[in-house]
Image (cartoon, rainbow, N blue to C red):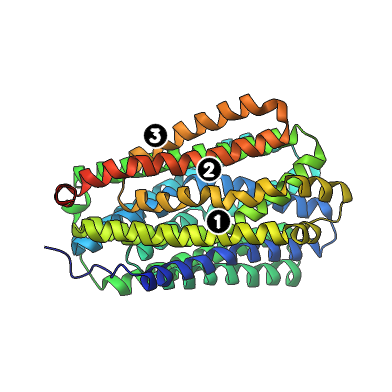
Amino acid sequence: MTSPNRVAVTHAAVIRLALPMTLAHMSTPLLGFADAAVIGRLGEPALLGAIAAAAVIFDFVFWGLGFLRMGTAGLTAQAVGAGDLAAERATLLRALLLALGLGTLLIALQRPIASVAFAALGATPAVTAAARSYYDIRIWSAPFALTNYVVLGAVIGRGRTDLGLVLQVLINLSNIALNVALVAGAGLGVRGSAVGTLLAEGVGAAVGLAVLARLHGRFAVDWAALRDRAALSRMLGVNRDIMIRSAALIFAFAFFTAQGARGGDVVLAANAVLMNLFLISAYFLDGFATAAEQMCGQSVGAGDGAGFRRAVGITALWCAAFSGAVTLIAFAGGGLFIDVVTTSPAVREAARLFLPFAALTPLCGAMAFEFDGVFVGATWTRDMRNLMLLSLGLYLALFAALRPLGNAGLWTALLGFLLARGLLQGWRYRALAGSTFPRAAAAR
């Protein structure tokens, strides 16, 4: 039997799921711009540098814990597809408890984390002092920020990406308003910015939990189900695999930045400008990956092999179409984009030289983005982890072989890494789909 909760797998459904998350992702750069603009108005370069430095630390820490969103989305979608409301509730509560525990742990370990992070950044004393005052306040937002990851994963798993958009915009707009009020209005400087972010995360968590309570209705906690060892082990295994995969991805891009820095300040700046093209395309591709998470997860829960394969095919088609369009736009308008982002003649010249490589990143990465969503939705996270590590090894080997080519070799290695991720996941997909839906495979 299939679940009556299964969403129709259509092109319209994919757009309905993907578009809100695309808009939600695109609201994030507005937040960073607003923070920089508010602090920048104070006229002290060290304060602006402090915000940027502290943001790197929190991006690294919180992105590394992004498994809370992805794991919750995949497990929730499967429970929804199976029509198992008790499993859906238990998944949510386990994830919330894990988020609370990890957030509390980050607060408890704030001093050693700060020591390692600020030593690695190596900023000037003035920047470090200001960034530390920001860090000491914002670290207390960790339980709220991680709760927001779980809330977002839960609404995505239910196919309510429209609610995900509303919650993300609420957090970002609250952050902007509070930053303006506390920094420009109250004159609290970087401390005001940190307090504003902390309060915005708290508002988002409170509203998000209220939304989930309304979606689920009033229910009693089934503590026996919550403590189910098999379910707990599965959740922890899924989250562990995604965490390792995310750490490998973070390392890959950190390695790219570090190797670019060895080419000098101009090359480093040019690479930073060009990577924005890839990040912009990621906003669109992430939306379709989110659609794949929900539709594939729900199909797995419903035991619907045909719907699962159709979801993979449709999301892959849209990913390919958007990546191709972004690539063409990057080739056509990349020069103008470079001129808008930087005024340095040397950086502009270097960026134009390597523009073709950057323009190809969305096309080379489309398959990886789409299959990330498929693998998360199906909770094939062990294979996703292993294939990421294999792709990372190929990336490093390719870089070593192409090192004499300098920055061109570095960009080529990055393109190879993106292609390897998608191709390896595509190769493994057939076997995993066959084992997940044995009857459908036998029929085929």
> Residue 357, how many percent across, how many down?
66, 45
- Return the residue found at the far left: 1
- Residue at point 34%, 69% (across, down): 212
Q: How crowded is mark 1: few (under 14 residues within 10 Å), some or many (20 or more)?
A: many
Q: Position of residue 435 (x, y in %)?
A: 21, 43
Label ID, residue 386: 3
Whether residue 2 is situated above or below residue 64 in the rendered picture: below
Location of residue 256 (image quadrant): top right
Residue drawn at the location 48% of the way across and 66% of the way down = 21
Label 2: state its secondary structure.
helix
Left or right: 413 with respect to 90?
right
From the image, tell me which residue sits under label 2: 418
**Residue contact at pointers 1 and 3, CB within 8 angstroms:** no
In the image: residue 418, left or right of residue 211: right
**Side of 58 where 307 appears, left or right:** left
- Disc 2 marks which amino acid? Leu
Residue in front for this viewpoint, 231 or 206: 231
* Amino acid type of the residue tagged 3 in the rendering: Asn
The residue that label 1 is drawn on is 282
Can you see residue 100? no
Q: How far apart are marks 1 and 2 (CA)?
A: 12 Å
Q: Which of 436 and 363 is in front in this view?
A: 363
Q: Which of marks 2 and 3 is in front?
A: 2
